[in-house]
Image (cartoon, rainbow, N blue to C red):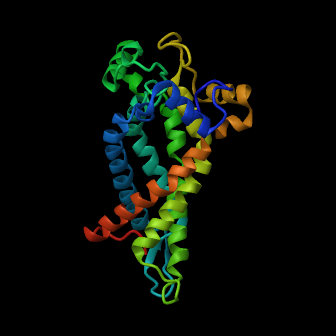
Amino acid sequence: MQCSPSGTYRGAIDTLTKTIRNEGFLALYKGATPPAIGWAGIDSVLLGSLHNYRLFLLQHGMTEPTPQSGVPRLTLLGHGIAGLFAGLTSAIVATPVELLKGMFLKLQLQSQKLVRDRQFKSPVDCARQVIRVEGITGMWSGLTGSLAFRSNFFWMFLSFEALMRVLSQTQGSRFEISTGAANFISGGLGSFAFWIMAIPADNVKNRMMSHPYPLPYPSKPNKPGFSATVRNIYAQQGFGGFFRGLGPCLVRAFPTNACAFFVYEGLMRVLGAEKTRH
């Protein structure tokens, strides 16, 4: 939807119906293998580095007293900065995984129904062709776009902490909810802030990674950089082009991120990890 030429689809529902009609129901799962395997590694790097960046900032004075108890806690800005650097760190792992997810794109953008008619037969075949044409560094094509996109984890973790603090104020009232429920709600709502801020960079990243679509790979070896891709999107689709695909992203954002935060924060409590939130 983001990378197809203008006029190909009228919206998310049109994309869904045309994909199923032209390629079958299983086409909805094209390129699922790389993220199914790779996102475990990506999120491990993201959340593991997040915890350590939080600890680092706590130890270096980016704190404020917690109301009532007075215990030093990381400031909201500190949570945002930790999220920013965690996102940048995870981009090193995320870029080749996202590149392979069709190459996030190259596999998904193929519309041929039969596998034998496709240029890329599988994620492994896709990676093999890219490395043969561009070398191993070709797996990090679009890194600048990935860095720009993942820097928006600043908003994700800042808003998550802000929402947790708001929900903590319900303690002792009839609206009080458990910590796990607060994690779930805050994670889901925080993802909206992330996607609203990140969707322009996501469009740029995906265009960079899908190059030279709709032409066959590798018909144009000279890939456009980040700024050139921004100019191309604006020239072809205007300002709205940077927000293509926002609707589907918001639909999936709440359940996936709410569950992720619920599990992550719960595991950190069970494992007795150092407290970086109060």
Q: How many labels does the image show?
A: 0
Query: Residue at the spot x=59%, y=33% of the render?
Result: 2
Query: Which percent across, then down, holds residue 234?
Result: 71, 30
**Visible in this render: residue 23?**
yes
Q: Is 127 located above or below residue 150 in the figure?
A: above
Query: Which percent across, then down, holds residue 45?
Result: 34, 48
Query: Residue at the spot x=35%, y=22% of the render?
Result: 127
**Visible in this render: residue 272?**
no
Query: Which percent across, then down, holds residue 178?
Result: 42, 78
Q: Is 205 located above or below residue 75 in the figure?
A: above
Query: Residue at the spot x=57%, y=25% of the render?
Result: 225
Q: Nearer the viewer, residue 18 or 107?
A: 18
The quadrant of the rendering that contains the C terminus is bottom left
The quadrant of the rendering that contains the N terminus is top right
Query: Which percent across, then down, holds residue 273?
Result: 29, 67
Horizontal side of 202 relative to 105 (left or right) equals right
Q: Nearer the viewer, residue 1 or 47?
A: 1
Looking at the image, the residue that sits furthest to the front is: 21
Residue 139: quarter of image: top left
Looking at the image, the residue that sits furthest to the top is: 219
Residue 159: quarter of image: bottom right
